[in-house]
Image (tube, helix red, strand yellow):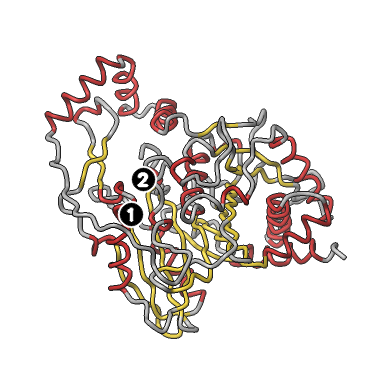
């Protein structure tokens, strides 16, 4: 909340594409589904109230005027809607900030897609998702079979909204218990940037940590400019088996292959722009990864256990290296240095987490990146493994899921990707002015992967 500015709305999104079943999949069915499942994420019926005088942190309160029809919306493309039309709509939706007087989320059913498909676009403020008491709503509307799971009915009665005086009394009580807290809050209200970052970290219970810090500023690239309020969005897709083949042939991880592919795509993109690229050129990526806590994540773990298990690594992507194999090995070596303590969580563990974890983990990864100085990295790359079996919403099979990672101040590009049911799905979120060729970069991901698969017998 403190980091949000007009050019950097702090919401994370997802674009899920479904095949419309014979039984149908319309707006009324989606609203019914959300109403049935929203009890699983009670934060989604709460809004933010600021304490008078900024004497304490803002608090979550029940929204007595909660209106599901305001949050679940309907849109349509002219039939047959193309992928280009869908990504343009997503860009416009993601450019608009959320209304801070209401619960901080929106969901759109987009009809009219070609081949009898529909899309569900979600927008959730990062303050909503901490992985402990709140997960992303995109996680709870999905099922592992076409038959929706039964969820107990709940009669929801909002708690009375506290008055300003009650909020002040609570703030005074908190100040007595923790005297330094009130001083910190006043500093935040005064616009102290350092206190703001500390506040974000503290409010999340020291949720994230930096495992590696840079001793020098990030390289200068066209990715780091003053950004506007408007966005572009593009997608890319590939077969997960291609990444696995490259991994097996070169003795690395799938995440290493992903970063190697991104490095190759960024190299081609820089060259297409006529940017100077030398043998030593790099682009520094912040890569949030899920890590283990004090104990391993059990197979029965829920998404609520993820809150303190996201750590960010800084990786210099060798865009100046012309050989795709050498690029891959350089990236793999850098990542081994970061993860050699054995604390990283593998894909098999992540997909055992209850529900569909990727939306929540992308949100946590974006929060990890937003709390650090943008002078030490050029872009964020979040890679979250998803389940390798089909998921359904109200009986409609989900075909694809593209993440939308928010931009940070001074950064024109963020890349998110999720593997799901045999595919790998990239979402590219870019500043509209600085990234006029975002679709070109997305296309270069396929070319970069082809370079690596060509090295595999």
**Where residue 455 is drawn, which disc sits there?**
none
Which of the image's four quarters has the C terminus? bottom right
- The answer to the question of whether label 1 and label 2 lie on touching residues, with beta carbons closer than 8 A, is yes
Residue lying farthest to the right in this orientation: 457
Q: CA distance from mark 1 to mark 2?
A: 8 Å
- Horizontal relation, residue 278 to residue 182: left or right: right
Q: Nearer the viewer, residue 65 or 164?
A: 65
Which residue is rendered at x = 34% and y = 73% of the image? 75
Residue 93 quadrant: bottom left
x then y, percent, for residue 345: 62, 43
Classify 3 as above or below 234. above
Which residue is rendered at x = 62% and y = 67% of the image? 237
Q: Is any part of residue 310 visible from this angle?
A: yes
The earlier-in-sequence mark between 1 and 2 is: 1
Q: Residues within 10 Å of mark 2 (few under 14, many from 20)?
A: many
x then y, percent, for residue 293: 55, 33
Which residue is rendered at x = 28% and y = 16% of the image? 177
x then y, percent, for residue 171: 22, 24
Q: Nearer the viewer, residue 156 or 427?
A: 156
- Horizontal relation, residue 11 to residue 66: left or right: right
Q: Which residue is mark 2?
A: 128
Q: What secondary structure is marked by label 1?
A: strand
Classify 430 as above or below 333. below
Classify 163 as above or below 170. below
Which of the image's four quarters has the N terminus? top left
Which residue is rendered at x = 59% and y = 43% of the image? 289
Q: Which residue is mark 1?
A: 105
């Amino acid at each position: 909340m403190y980091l949000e500015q007009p050019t950097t709305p702090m919401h994370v999104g997802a674009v899920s594409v479904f095949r419309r079943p014979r039984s149908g999949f319309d707006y009324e069915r989606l609203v019914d589904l959300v109403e049935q499942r929203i009890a699983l994420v009670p934060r989604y019926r709460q809004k933010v109230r600021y304490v008078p005088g900024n004497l304490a942190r803002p608090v979550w309160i029940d929204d007595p005027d909660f209106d599901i029809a305001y949050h679940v919306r309907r849109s349509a493309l002219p039939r047959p809607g193309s992928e280009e039309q869908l990504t343009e709509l997503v860009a416009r939706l993601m450019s608009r900030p959320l209304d801070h007087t209401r619960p901080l989320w929106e969901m759109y059913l987009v009809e009219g897609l070609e081949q009898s498909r529909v899309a569900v676009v979600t927008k959730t403020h990062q303050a909503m998702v901490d992985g402990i008491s709140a997960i992303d709503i995109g996680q709870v509307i999905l099922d592992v079979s076409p038959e929706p799971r039964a969820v107990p009915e709940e009669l929801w009665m909002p708690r009375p909204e506290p008055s300003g005086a009650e909020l002040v009394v609570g703030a005074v009580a908190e100040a007595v218990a923790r005297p330094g807290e009130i001083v910190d809050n006043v500093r935040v209200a005064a616009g102290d940037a350092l206190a703001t970052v500390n506040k974000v970290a503290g409010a999340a219970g020291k949720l994230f940590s930096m495992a590696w810090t840079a001793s020098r500023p990030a390289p200068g690239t066209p990715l780091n400019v003053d950004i506007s309020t408007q966005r572009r969005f593009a997608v890319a897709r590939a077969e997960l088996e291609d990444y696995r083949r490259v991994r097996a042939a070169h003795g690395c991880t799938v995440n290493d292959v992903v970063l190697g592919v991104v490095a190759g795509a960024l190299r081609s993109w820089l060259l297409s722009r006529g940017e100077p690229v030398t043998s030593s050129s790099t682009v520094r990526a912040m890569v949030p990864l899920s890590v283990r806590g004090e104990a391993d994540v059990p197979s029965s773990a829920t998404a609520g256990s993820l809150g303190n298990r996201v750590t960010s690594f800084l990786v210099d992507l060798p865009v100046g290296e012309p050989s795709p194999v050498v690029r891959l090995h350089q990236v793999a070596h850098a990542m081994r240095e970061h993860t050699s303590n054995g604390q990283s969580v593998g894909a098999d563990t992540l997909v055992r987490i209850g529900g569909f974890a990727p939306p929540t983990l992308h949100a946590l990864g974006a929060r990890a990146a937003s709390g650090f100085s943008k002078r030490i990295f050029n872009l964020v790359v979040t890679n979250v493994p998803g389940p390798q079996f089909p998921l359904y919403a109200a009986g409609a099979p989900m075909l694809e899921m593209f993440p939308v990672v928010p931009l940070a101040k001074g950064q024109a590009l963020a890349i998110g990707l999720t593997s799901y049911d045999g595919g790998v799905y990239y979402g590219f979120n870019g500043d509209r002015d600085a990234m006029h060729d975002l679709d070109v970069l997305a296309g270069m991901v396929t070319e970069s992967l082809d370079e690596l698969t060509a090295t595999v017998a």
